[in-house]
Amino acid sequence: MQAITLAIGKQGITFFAQHYLAGALSALLSKMTPPDKSVGVPNFTGGVVGDSYDYSNIKINLNGGSLRNFSAALDKVTQGVGSDGKTPVFNVNMQARNFQALYNWVESFHYMHNYTTVPYGSKIPVWHHDPGDGSNTFSYSPGFGQLDVTIVIQFSFDKDKNQWEFTVQKASPNASNISANIPGGSILQDQVNSCTRSHVDDATAQAIDAIDFATPVNQLLTGIVQTIPGSGNLGNGIVYDFSLGDSGMLFPNNDGIQIGIKGGASFNGTPFSGPTPPSLPLPVPPADNDAHHLNLYVSNFELEALHWAFYKAGKLNTVVNPTDLPDPQALKVATYVALEKSLLPYKAFAMQAQITQNAAPVTLAQTVWELTQNVMNTLQSQLPQNVFALMSGLAGNAYVSQAALESDLQSANVPAQYFSAIENAAKRMGLAVTQNMNFDLLIQNGSPTPPDIKFSLQRTDVLTTLKLGVNSNNNQTLQYDFLSTGYQAAFISSSVPGFKGDNFGTIIWPVGGEPQYDKVLADMGATGAPIPIMNGFQFDFANAQVSLQQGYISILANVKYQ
């Protein structure tokens, strides 16, 4: 099963490396300490004729290292294969320029002081060879013109651990353009020739090259990729499964990533099975010259799973009191006494409406007709003015059958010759949601068993305004609105003596139940079906291109890094 499929192009991969990896790694490494390093320097003689030093057993230890003014920038990211010749990897090349290292320079050495003296009264100099041991401690601040780092990263899914993983296979730093800046009081200043400087430069570069890049990069990437499952937790026991789907993970032509993701929700650990678990096709990664970061397919199954989970959690049931409504009189018995005489003994009381779902809503992709504002704008330019004026009362309506639309057009006295133009303008592929509910009215007369009136209610909605957004739980989700296309209320029973109001539900539902139930559906649509994403990243909601296809929703989008 895979209810979500994802393709990431070169632009998306580069964005991740540039805005997360480079920045986070640079900040982390700037606080790291380069390892201690011993510098081997050959024996040499310094000084002048008649007063020289032979230095031997020279040891220079660099310790207590730190970095200053270190900032790494992304050079490029390329895809390829690892050292085994088959594992897909990402080669991330980073550069840091013009930074310094700070060290304690501790030098120890043996010396032979060679000098002459002329004894009193003699003209013949006498040579002296005084041995000794010495040591000095200085601050050492070598400069680096450039540091190039190549990091080889594998992206995979560990089925045994059921988790996404980044693994650093290798990190290869290479420091160059080094200014050793040998301390002024060091014995090396007595003979700073190309050979001595080369030893110091090489050792200093080796100390920087020995910094463990692989471990912090692994930590950074492991931490970020392991936040993906949490993006599917909607709270209230509703969790989406963002593990690897049927297609696995592919790297087509080493140019982008394609991933199948299971999807589907569970409620308190029980998964939604649905009638036919989907296996969506994989999108094609955006081309290298396409500014979009990713292409995402979300199956209708994800919306069905959301509706099922809300049903299981009882979040589609609601209780309506008069004060919950725009017009409280809609649930006052006195409002309906003239219509239904059997209610006369209860005219002083209010009613409470209880709306409960008998089953999870069912989602079906089908042709729908919507008279949206855009459609009405189109029709205004296509229809005669007098004909368009007849349609003003139908604006905003949605229909799941052509017959229902034509029935309303006939009722509005629109000539049949214009039906085809109207239908073509309003027609599109849509998602219809049918709901099977009970609508119970309880008369609040203070009785332990208050009089009640029971109806069954069938309601059909069309999902509209598909978009990406953030819900109240901070999930990034595919969100939508519900647009009612109609309902049917059927009388079940009543404990009110003599009640015969077979049409009563049709009258009271639009004013006494629907306003509050619309809010319940709006809350579910605003919660939305979650989209897998890593912490710190956010879809570019405003510019995402969301379109409904046969069986799935297609999303072409960019991401931002917060």
Image (spheres, rainbow, N blue to C red):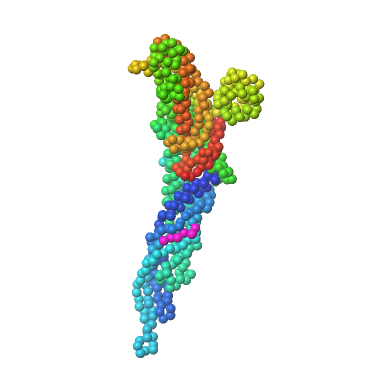
Which percent across, then down, holds residue 347?
A: 40, 14
At a point 45% along the width and 60% down the height, the residue shown is 100
Whether residue 158 is visible here, answered yes or no, is no
Above or below, 80 relative to 522: below
At a point 42% along the width and 21% down the height, the residue shown is 353
Above or below, 50 relative to 331: below
Whether residue 28 is visible here, answered yes or no, is yes
At a point 46% along the width and 33% down the height, the residue shown is 527
Question: Observer-nearest residue: 417 or 223?
Answer: 417
Q: Across the whole image, how many numbered discs are drawn on residues?
A: 0
- What residue occupies the far top of the structure in this picture? 498
Left or right: 19 with respect to 137? right
Look at the magenta stretch and give its main secondary structure: strand
Above or below, 512 relative to 128: above
- Tell me, yes or no, whether the highlighted magenta stretch contains residue 31: no
Q: Quadrant of residue 352?
A: top left
Q: What stretch is highlighted in magenta?
A: 97-102
- What residue occupies the far bottom of the structure in this picture? 121
Which percent across, then down, holds residue 458?
A: 48, 20
- What residue occupies the far left of the structure in this picture? 448
Which percent across, then down, holds residue 145?
A: 49, 60
- Tell me, yes or no, whether the highlighted magenta stretch contains residue 100: yes
Above or below, 270 relative to 226: above
At a point 40% along the width and 57% down the height, the residue shown is 33
Which percent across, then down, holds residue 334?
A: 42, 15
Question: Observer-nearest residue: 110 or 187?
Answer: 187
